[in-house]
Image: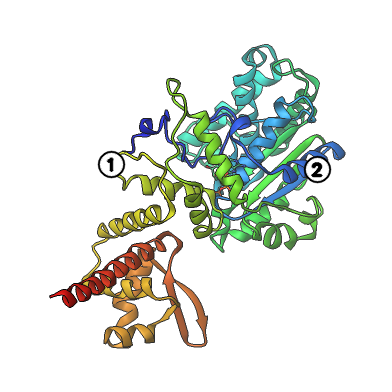
């Protein structure tokens, strides 16, 4: 348990959840950078009355936070086109991959947001009250059918239970169109909006399964007409291949989308330092004059290089380092000390994996080598039969997520540490240096005797 109060903080500044409207950290204060991306979005919203955009980038780069911030600006900022949105993102999962469930998710999310911002509207407006009942019923069917909320197309007639009949998808589409009209014709929480944003998050998970690709393409084909509804702005977030492999794979789908995806790159080093400073400022205990930064900026820079700008991994690393500090931290930790502690934490985490002494020996060789290593090199270095190397040593280390195949050249496979375990290099190298220094000192001492 890390005591955040010793730094003058109320709670953990390295929480890795995306920034979101209504979250622990106020998004308008905690969000840094991205002015170019926000300007692109603002321009698209101003020039087009509907849009379909893909927001692409590596894991943890800040896609969800960017879109949440843009949604926040559209909802509350005076100088931005006012467009309504719901804070709860729709998760891209197998459950929503059909028009019916997708519509139910959207309608349910919009109603929930209206309930949060302007609950009176739900009871006073017939359309909203009716839609809320509809979502409720569908939810009940979903739950009693043993499936996830919002799953549609359940063949009620075949169900042994006495369930209300399902609503045809065309009727649902009509309701959705009515809801969009309602949003642009009625003030919500005293604000007049000019459209609706629909934010579908995390296509990474679906696309990591090659078998799902076809289903995702079918989904986009099926919802093609929804994508053309005026005043609706869609954001689909995911990995780089989402545009290349899915959207561009079919002309009929691609023509619905904005020509260029918005690719989100890592924040700069300075922006990451700034983001972390902002967080600490926001979480400062009320009774202290100033918080104490646990780390110098150099530590953040080192972790930035190590994790290639992935803010989530950087913050997890910082937390892991602090979990290793038992004494009170008076001065911010410097890079050498911090990386050693990170190495120590990673090394301790290996203990839970009950590796054999020989597997640890192989791991140490891999971790201290300057180059990637092949199976043949390992056999030579450990005096073991090459045929045993992969079965007994490499595969278990790979399965535990400690090492990975880095490169293949002909028959040769090159192995190295995964990003998560690279820090064990630091502790092993430090041990090596201490050992060398001790030997040198012993030799020097011997000269005196
Ligand atoms: N512009 C920003 N300013 C401050 N913090 C940010 C910013 N962008 C991202 N973060 C922080 O970085 C972390 C990762 O961000 P986020 O969850 O938005 O990334 P992501 O690309 O959506 O990740 P994933 O691929 O896992 O969905 C979060 O803790 C978030 O608070
Ligand atoms: Mg995300």
**Which residue is depicted at the point 35% across and 63% down?**
400
- Label 2 to label 1, Cα distance in Å? 60 Å
Residue 398 x, y percent position in the rendering = 38, 69
The residue to which callout 2 is attached is: 228
Q: Secondary structure at mark 1?
A: loop
- Whether residue 155 is visible, yes or no, is no
For disc 1, does the CB lie below 8 Å from ligand 1? no
User: Outermost residue, left direction?
Assistant: 449
Total count of labels:
2
* Residue found farthest to the front: 448
Q: Compared to 28, does 243 lie above or below?
A: below
Closest to the observer, 206 or 54:
54
**Location of mark 1 (residue):** 327
Mark 2 lies within 8 Å of ligand 2 (Cβ measured): no
Q: Can residue 51 be seen here?
A: yes
x and y percentages locating residue 104 in the rendered image: 62, 35
| Residue at horizontal 69 percent and vertical 38 percent from the top | 198
Residue nearer the viewer, 353 or 111: 353
Q: In which quarter of the view is residue 156 placed?
A: top right
Give left or right: position of 64 versus 438. Answer: right
Q: Locate the N terminus by quadrant.
A: top left
- Residue at 50% across / 51% down in the picture? 298
Quadrant of picture, ligand 1 = top right
Above or below: residue 410 compared with residue 145: below
**Closer mark to the observer between disc 2 and disc 1:** 1
Q: Are marks 2 and 1 in contact (CB under 8 Å)?
A: no
Q: Is residue 438 left or right of residue 125?
A: left
Quarter of the C terminus within the rendering: bottom left
């Amino acid at each position: 348990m890390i005591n955040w109060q010793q730094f003058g903080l109320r709670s953990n500044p390295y929480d890795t959840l995306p920034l979101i409207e209504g979250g622990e950290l106020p998004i308008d204060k905690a969000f840094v950078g991205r002015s170019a991306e926000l300007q692109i979005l603002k321009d698209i919203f101003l020039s087009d009355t509907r849009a379909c955009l893909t927001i692409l980038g590596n894991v943890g780069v800040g896609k969800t936070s960017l879109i949440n911030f843009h949604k926040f600006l559209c909802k509350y900022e005076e100088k931005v086109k006012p467009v309504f949105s719901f804070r709860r993102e729709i998760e891209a999962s197998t459950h929503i991959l059909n028009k019916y469930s997708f519509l139910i998710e959207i309608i349910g999310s919009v109603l929930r947001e209206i309930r949060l911002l302007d609950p009176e509207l739900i009871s006073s407006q017939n359309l909203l009250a009716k839609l809320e009942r509809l979502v409720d019923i569908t939810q009940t069917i979903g739950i009693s059918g043993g499936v996830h909320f919002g799953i549609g197309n359940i063949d009620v007639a075949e169900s042994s239970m006495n369930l209300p009949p399902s609503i045809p998808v065309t009727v649902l589409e009509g309701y959705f169109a009515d809801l969009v009209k309602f949003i642009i014709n009625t003030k919500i929480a005293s604000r007049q909006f000019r459209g609706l944003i629909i934010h579908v998050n995390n296509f990474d998970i679906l696309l990591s399964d090659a078998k799902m690709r076809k289903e995702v393409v079918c989904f986009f084909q099926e919802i093609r007409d929804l994508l053309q509804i005026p005043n609706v702005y869609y954001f689909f977030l995911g990995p780089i291949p989402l545009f290349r492999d899915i959207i561009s794979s079919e002309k009929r789908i691609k023509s619905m989308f904005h020509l260029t995806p918005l690719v989100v790159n890592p924040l700069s080093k300075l922006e990451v330092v700034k983001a972390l400073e902002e967080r600490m400022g926001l979480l400062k205990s009320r009774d202290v004059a100033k918080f104490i930064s646990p780390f110098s900026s150099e530590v953040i820079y080192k972790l930035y290089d190590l994790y290639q700008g992935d803010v989530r991994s950087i913050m997890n690393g910082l937390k892991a380092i602090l979990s290793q500090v038992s004494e009170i931290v008076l001065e911010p930790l410097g890079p050498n000390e911090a990386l050693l502690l990170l190495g120590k934490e990673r090394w301790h985490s290996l203990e839970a994996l009950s590796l054999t002494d020989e597997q640890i020996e192989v791991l140490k060789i891999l971790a201290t080598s300057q180059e990637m290593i092949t199976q043949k090199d390992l056999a030579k270095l450990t005096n073991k039969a090459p045929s045993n190397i992969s079965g007994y040593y490499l595969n278990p280390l790979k399965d535990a997520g400690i090492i990975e195949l880095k490169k293949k050249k002909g028959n040769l496979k090159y192995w190295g540490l995964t990003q998560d375990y690279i820090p064990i290099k630091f502790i092993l190298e430090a041990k090596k240096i201490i050992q060398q220094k001790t030997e040198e000192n012993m030799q020097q001492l011997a000269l005196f005797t």
